[in-house]
Image (cartoon, rainbow, N blue to C red):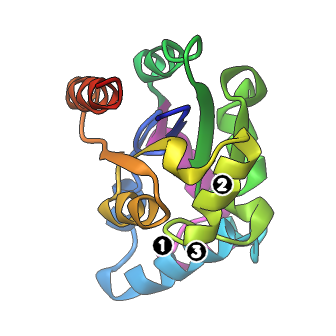
Amino acid sequence: MIKAIIFDCFGVLYRDNISLLYDVIPVEKHQALQDLIHGSDYGFLSREEYYAGAAELAGKTANEIRELEKKQHLRDDQMIAYSQTFRLNYKLGLLSNIDSVTIRRYLPDIEQLFDAFVVSGDVGITKPSLEIFELIATRLGVRTEECLMIDDLPKNVEGATLAGMQSVLFTSKQQLERDITACLSEESQ
């Protein structure tokens, strides 16, 4: 029985347009950018080190990268409101591959919105590692089998499933509403 619903942040609650950053970096440097992103997500690089590295790859200043990043993340208030409709019947969690400084900048109300949250930069583990799914379930006080994970990346949905969670691949709010309704109605039968 589902007792907790866990949301990814970027790509689900925030529209993440990381492609803007990839557009200003030459294709041959995309792997280096991916390495920077992972270094920041794991907490190995500070946000300032990330900006400096991305700026070097793009041939821009760190301030230009910060400005570009601001354009990348737009809070989807409809999705956040939708997530809160489950609060009466389910525990709510947030699980994101990001550092804690950035998540608090984008979700300053994180403690009010979610019963528990895990960000990879704090724990040194990223999705789709099974351990991070187990950690968010533990923080929510439930078993992984009692969780429904919502993510926009297939590899993270697969990781959640391997950890024992039910999972839904997010592509749009309308699709998510249909899939969650179907998933929760199967649970009640």
Q: Which residues are magenta?
A: 52-74
- Chief SS of the magenta region: helix
Viewer-proximal residue among 57 and 152: 152
Residue 73: x and y in percent read 49, 39
Question: Which of the 4 quarters of the picture holds residue 79?
Answer: top left
Q: Earlier in the sequence, mark 3 or mark 1?
A: 3
Secondary structure, mark 3, is helix
Q: Residues within 10 Å of mark 2 (few under 14, many from 20)?
A: few
Q: What residue sits right under mark 1 in the picture?
A: 58
Judging by the rendered image, the residue that carries numbered circle 3 is 38
Task: Residue 44 in the image: state x and y as whole percent.
Answer: 76, 77
The quarter of the picture where residue 19 lies is bottom left
Measuring 43% from the left and 66% from the top, which residue is drawn there?
159
Question: Residue 63 — which label?
Answer: 2
Residue at 34%, 27% in the rendered image: 184
Task: Give the image location of residue 94, x and y in percent.
Answer: 61, 40
The residue positioned farthest toward the front in the image shown: 189
Say whether disc 1 or disc 2 marks the residue closer to the N-terminus: 1
Rounded to the nearest whole Å, what is the CA distance between mark 1 and mark 2? 12 Å
Amino acid carrying mark 3 in the image: His
Residue in view at x 37 percent, y 57 percent? 157
